[in-house]
Amino acid sequence: MSPADAAPDFADRTDFEDADRGLVAGPANARITAPDGRVVWDFEATAFLRQDCPDTADRSLWRQSQLCARAGLYQVTEGIYQIRGFDLSNMTLIEGERGIVVIDPLVSQECAAEGLALYRTHRGERPVTAVLFTHSHIDHFGGILGVISPDDNVPIVAPEGFMEHSVAENVYAGTAMLRRGAYHTGGELEPGPRGLIGVGLGFTASHGLPSLLPPTVEITRTGQEERLDGVLLRFQLTPDTEAPSELNFHLPERRALCMAENATHNLHNILTLRGALVRDARIWSRYLTEAINLFTADSDVVFASHHWPTWGTERLTTFLSEQRDLYGYLHDQTLRLLNQGHTGTEIAEMIELPPRLANAWHTRGYYGSVSHNVKAIYQRYMGWYDGHPASLWEHPPTASAQRYVDCMGGIDSVLTKARSYMDTDDLRFAAQLLKHATFAAPDETRAKELLAETFERLGHGAECGTWRNNYLMAAQELRTGVKPTPITTGSMTTTLSVEQILDSLAIRVNGPRAWNHSLTMLWRFTDLDQTYRTSLHNGVLVHHPATDTSADDTADLTLTLTKPQLTDMLTSGSLDGIDHTGDPGTLATLMSVLDEPDPNFPIVTP
């Protein structure tokens, strides 16, 4: 048997024993709802996973989904508890001298509040005395207003660069990432054997309200120690691993190690399918080595912000070592082959994992696949260009599709060929052909239905949960059209700095529409004691702190306002209630050149 054919032992129930260990109580309610009654999380949605695996799902992914479907309050070790199965991620609760330190409060406020209530039902009304964000992804900070209020005077701890990267991902590119994220998590698929069975990292993301509060304590170096509510935490900074801003931490007095999202029970993403900065597999592997050397000898349990813990010093050391080897192997072998002239697509077909890694359950590609991770590593080093000059100036998808279909003899010929490839189970090439057909003739329902059928079959056979969700979301959209993106990050804008808000405006400027406009504005923030100057020239909105406030007369419009007024003004486009001098039409001109992001843009149709 070759490494490519290797598979772990389905008779091994160790993961199930670990996932069930320490259960204190299951959820108190069948559903979690928003204040308006909308269901944001349904615990019964995973009930179908109690059945045997059907022929519409990969057996290995079904097993992983069964493990991720477990929900409730779990004890990790003395004084450490986790809320699992209440969202895509876990929320960890560390008991201190006066209350609890909350680690990574899920995606949404509603789910975090429900999880905290379950904990308090069984462990007492302990107050939240600190919050720690392990990294800059929304499923690890979005629920913060479900566990504390903005007025609570508790430390909020995060790694260096947290706000910069959380805003860059969730605001600057947030619209596109959320749209593609709907494919990634399969949140609009019907839960069940033919639809959503999980994302590999958890079941899916909740549909509640995300929030964000800025950190008050920053972790800037490995070895930094902080006592939170009497609990000693020793930190390891791991930038550019699973997130550009991330940390692990050790609890030496409790012999427990938290690996954030740097070591979970699957192969993670080097580049997530929803979009993100390409991660550094080389440094990821090295930080895992560092964590092993720093912490494992003094640890009895390792846990993370997804999945279930691993107990025992020897077992957790093996777990982390194999995770380390997994990312190191993918990195090194991709570089070896690209230096022999192979492209990312070619390397993705060539790489096989060593048998020991291929046979370990926790290295399987449920969330990130070997195939798309290899392409991501290639992209990090070599970029989008594969080196062939024909790739330099290709036509965009619709124009290319029209020409391919013409070359193949028209749409009827393409559909006939695609069906023949489907009949021989070459679904990969059938999908390529039908992509051209749907882009060349977007109103051709036969092409869309045939492509939907192809995607459905590909999805039902995928071991990677994110691949399955992408295929099945595409099939659903081809048949029923685009559904509105269920999550919005608009509730996070109040926590952005003025600089980040102005960055967000600059991203929205429609360059051609702004070419012939030239304007300058001065923004005086009385609540921040800050002044910013913005100028629009050549379709670019430039901003910087204003150091020469005596030059007010050179601004077309000067505003004196507070930061909350800025948010309201940009929403309404009105200067009502804001002190100003100069030409008020300047604001109208600026607003007229701003595009509104489209959260529901098409993906599988032109």
Image (cartoon, helix red, strand yellow):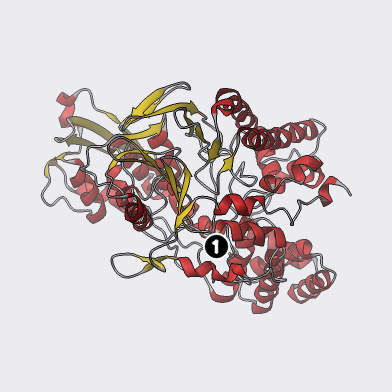
Label 1 secondary element: loop
Q: Position of residue 533 (x, y in %)?
A: 25, 32
* Residue situated in front as seen by the camera: 453 or 207: 207
Q: Seen in the image, is 389 located left or right of residue 189?
A: right
Q: Seen in the image, is 178 located left or right of residue 575?
A: right
Does residue 464 appear anywhere in the picture? yes
Q: Residue at x 17, y 47 (%)?
A: 584
Label 1 environment density (alpha carbons within 10 Å; few <14, some 14–19, many ≥20): many
- 549 relative to 606, above or below: above
Q: Position of residue 439 (x, y in %)?
A: 64, 66
Q: Residue at x 39, y 34 (%)?
A: 158
Count of all numbered marks drawn on residues in the image = 1
* Residue situated in front as seen by the camera: 548 or 365: 365
* Residue situated in front as seen by the camera: 12 or 597: 12
Direction right: furthest residue? 1
* Residue situated in front as seen by the camera: 106 or 370: 106
Q: Seen in the image, is 335 located left or right of residue 557?
A: right
Residue of label 1: 186
Q: Position of residue 42 (x, y in %)?
A: 45, 67
On-image quarter of the C terminus: bottom right
Does residue 511 appear anywhere in the picture? no
* Quadrant of the image occupied by residue 346: top right
Q: Seen in the image, is 546 located left or right of residue 336?
A: left
- 186 relative to 364, above or below: below
Q: Position of residue 71 (x, y in %)?
A: 48, 58
- 355 relative to 44, above or below: above
* Quadrant of the image occupied by residue 196: bottom right
What amino acid type should be assigned to the residue bearing mark 1? Gly
